[in-house]
Amino acid sequence: MITLIKNVYILTMNANFSEYPEGYLLIEDELIVAVGELAELTAEIKWDQVVDGKGGILLPGMVNTHTHVGMIPFRSLGDDTPDRLRQLLFPLENSCMTKELAYHSAKYALAEMQLAGITTVVDMYYFEDAILEAADEMDIRGIFGETIIDFPTCDSVKPHGGLSYAKDLIPRWINHKKLTPAIAPHATNTNHPNILIEANQLALKKQVPFTIHVAEMDYEVAFFEKEYDLTPVGFLNKLDCLGEHVIAAHCIHVTEADIQLLKQTGTKVAHCIGANTKSAKGVAPIKAMLDAGISVGLGTDGPSSGNTLDLFTQMKLVANFHKTDLQDRSAFPAKEIVRLATMGGAEVVGLEKEIGSLEVGKKADFMIIETESVNMFPIFDPYAVLVYSANASNVQSVYSDGCLLVDNKQLVNHSLRGLKINLQQEMTAFYQRVAELTE
């Protein structure tokens, strides 16, 4: 099937930031076969169907480089609680999370992301096999890792049980077309050093990604300084747990020396500005990381941490916080921020040759942003409109591998209402358990 999409303003997000104000995109099955100005479309090119973009902005699908899709039930619960992770979330997860709840939460979370133009995601949570089933049914692209942590959890009676879980998980999903299993130690300070080493060796042996929270917490930094006279990044480097396969989430409290280690080892960084600033943890120095040549992408974090699961929110927060932190209005031009959400994310997940930009031979992962809504006029700079004016509700259509997943702002293959009802039904027991634990 060959599809012509016309009447769109195309932002390719390629190395030259090529734009086609009156552009067209030609896709055949799952691949892009042509992109350019509509006036240059020759009569020799044939197609089976035409899609009118109605003057919308067409750009690559976004990449969410860090989240926890099983945590929808915790959204808006105790948001202003000090030390929320240890005082509230960990105990509730261990007491209330089930395989069925994680599955239905994942479907709902992935639907929210698809409606916001996200076509690729990196996830870390529990019952990850069920979450992968949900992701397969939602037809999203992504990397999914079972959490490894140093205490018993909702799906493991033993500390570090996630490592055994991962050993079973990887063979079942390693050859999937769009889904990649991963190794996902929770954090530098919540795993024994030997477990981190073993987990990384497994990732290297199986050639899968390794994702971990790094330098996110102040008490994490204090622990490594006191116990090892190292930073969390320096500690991982000492264990040989950095590298091109590693996605380090957050990296808020990093030093100049840390940045050099990340650069030298090729480690990638997932920047979660929304969750980090909501929890008053700080602003990661990603301008310095980008200047050093480190691959950086945007992440929403989980729906209980950043609450929203769209990257439009993150792009605006990147602009506002980093410009303020650096006291430099020009520090992050809008097109660079859009790149973080697209090609930057593709580099972080190691798929820059397949997704992240609209180029011939790449996967047909893209979205069309409508420009008829009140917040979308006028458009002097499409990048600025995307960062400062647009929001997830402006996403008109979403394609992944050339398949239409969102049309006219509605899921094509699923009912959002149905997904919500299923999740609500599964949350009945969850509400009861939460009430008992929070009395």
Image (spheres, rainbow, N blue to C red):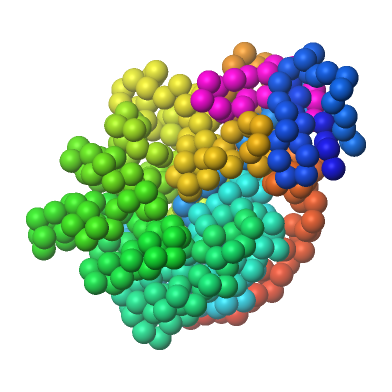
Expressed as whole percent of the image width and height from the top left, the position of residue 311 reads 54, 41
Instruction: Identify whether 211 is placed above or below 193.
Output: above
Q: Residue at x 56, y 27 (%)?
A: 14
Q: Quadrant of residue 85?
A: bottom left
Q: Is residue 234 visible?
A: yes
Q: Quadrant of residue 205?
A: bottom left
- The boundaries of the magenta stretch are 5-22
Q: Nearer the viewer, residue 87 or 158?
A: 158
Q: Quadrant of residue 415?
A: bottom right
Total labels: the figure holds 0
Question: Which secondary structure type mostly characterizes the magenta part of the structure?
Answer: strand
Was residue 8 drawn as part of the magenta stretch in this picture? Answer: yes
Point out the image quarter for the C terminus. bottom left
Q: Residue at x 69, y 74 (%)?
A: 425
Q: Residue at x 54, y 40 (%)?
A: 353
Was residue 274 drawn as part of the magenta stretch in this picture? Answer: no
Instruction: Identify whether 62 is placed above or below 181.
Output: above
Expressed as whole percent of the image width and height from the top left, the position of residue 169 reads 51, 73
Q: Is residue 210 left or right of residue 413?
A: left
Point out the image quarter for the N terminus. top right
Seen from this angle, which residue lies furthest front? 44
Expressed as whole percent of the image width and height from the top left, the position of residue 142 reads 57, 55
Q: Is residue 433 left or right of residue 82?
A: right
